[in-house]
């Protein structure tokens, strides 16, 4: 079973479950991030920095007719704006880091990594076909060791799993209309048309495209049946999953639970500190599995 630390890119960058999974002793080769499709809402184009004066950056895009439910594959980011936003946050962020850690950290390495980040983000923005590709590539840039896969690829390659579930229960989803490219709520059994553009949509065609996100606990169940376990401590998800598993007459636990770290870091901070991560590990009280690795792995 492979452990999924994914979701939408903004969620991956904020929660940094890759860092947590490694801290829990899970091997890198056993970890993957399943990348969900997402819309144009501001929350979904956010890079959370951490507890700084500028705590997060929202990448700017042109939202046609204020359609925030439009797929992120329909717009591009603005390279110059991405660089400007990161440059605006640099001085206060570096200053706070230096005031906290002083001589215990090589501030020049931190500055060099920040410059590398600005350059990398601008290159990604310039070369990405759309916002989704940019955000997905940002995750890969921050954590090059982390394997990734698109959610729709899993769904397309495991059609038997979905059809078998539909024989026993309906599946609520956030679907992407193949005509207007907007997200809307439906279920796979009742899907007949897009409520936004009124175009007819064949349920079977949507299922085969994989262009939907299972809801209400069905995502963890489906990916578990495809041999992936979701990295989560969510009690709500656990209760939803239990009800679904009872309905479909399956036994097992689609969630991979873990012990929360006392020292929380965003993926941005893991990237920024790189080989200076040992400062964080000594500064905070983290889990024992890290001691077995000699506190030498890098994020």
Image (tube, rainbow, N blue to C red):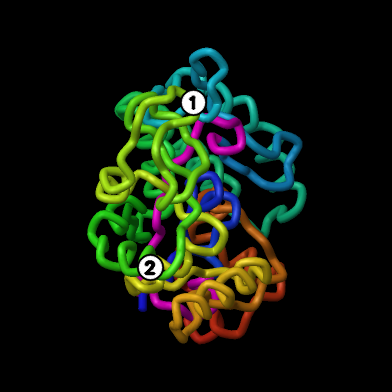
Q: Tell me the number on the disc at residue 196.
A: 1
Residue beneath the point at 61% across and 73% down: 238
Residue beneath the point at 73% across and 47% down: 51
Q: Tell me the number on the disc at residue 165.
A: 2
In the image, which residues are magenta? 21-45
Q: Secondary structure at mark 1?
A: loop
Vertical placement of 298 versus 55: above or below? below
Residue beneath the point at 40% across and 22% down: 75
Tell me the quarter of the picture where residue 177 sits: top left
Q: Tell me the number on the disc at residue 47.
A: none
For the N terminus, the quadrant is bottom left
Q: Is residue 123 visible?
A: no
Vertical placement of 119 versus 222: above or below? above
Marks 2 and 1 sit apart, C-alpha to C-alpha, by: 27 Å
Residue 184 lies, in percent from the top left, at 50, 37
In the picture, measured across the screen, residue 148 lies left or right of residue 294, that is left
- Looking at the picture, tell me which residue is in the foreground, 216 or 283: 216
- Looking at the picture, tell me which residue is in the foreground, 166 or 41: 166
- Looking at the picture, tell me which residue is in the foreground, 229 or 134: 229
Residue 243 lies, in percent from the top left, at 58, 74
């Amino acid at each position: 079973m492979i452990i999924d630390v994914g979701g939408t890119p903004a969620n991956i960058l904020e929660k940094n479950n890759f860092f947590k999974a490694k801290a829990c002793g899970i091997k890198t080769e056993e970890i993957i991030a399943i990348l969900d499709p997402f819309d144009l809402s501001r929350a979904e184009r956010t890079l959370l920095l951490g507890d700084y004066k500028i705590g997060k950056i929202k990448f700017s895009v042109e939202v046609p007719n204020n359609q925030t439910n439009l797929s992120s594959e329909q717009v591009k980011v603005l390279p110059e704006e991405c660089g400007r936003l990161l440059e605006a946050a640099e001085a206060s962020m570096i200053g706070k880091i230096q005031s906290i850690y002083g001589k215990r950290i090589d501030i020049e390495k931190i500055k060099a990594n920040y410059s590398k980040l600005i350059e990398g983000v601008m290159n990604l923005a310039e070369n990405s076909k759309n916002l989704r590709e940019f955000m997905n590539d940002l995750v890969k840039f921050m954590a090059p060791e982390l394997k990734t896969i698109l959610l729709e690829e899993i769904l397309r390659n495991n059609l038997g799993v979905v059809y078998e579930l539909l024989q026993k229960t309906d599946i609520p989803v956030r679907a992407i209309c193949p005509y207007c490219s907007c997200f809307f709520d439906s279920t796979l059994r009742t899907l007949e048309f897009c409520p936004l553009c009124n175009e007819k949509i064949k349920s079977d065609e949507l299922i085969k495209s994989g262009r939907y996100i299972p809801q209400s606990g069905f995502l963890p169940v489906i990916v578990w049946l495809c041999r992936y376990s979701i990295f989560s401590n969510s009690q709500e998800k656990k209760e939803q999953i239990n009800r679904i598993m009872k309905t479909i007459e399956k036994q097992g636990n689609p969630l991979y639970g873990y012990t929360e770290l006392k020292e929380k870091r965003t993926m941005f901070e893991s990237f920024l500190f790189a080989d200076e991560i040992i400062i964080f590990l000594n500064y905070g009280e983290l889990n024992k599995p890290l001691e077995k690795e000699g506190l030498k792995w890098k994020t």
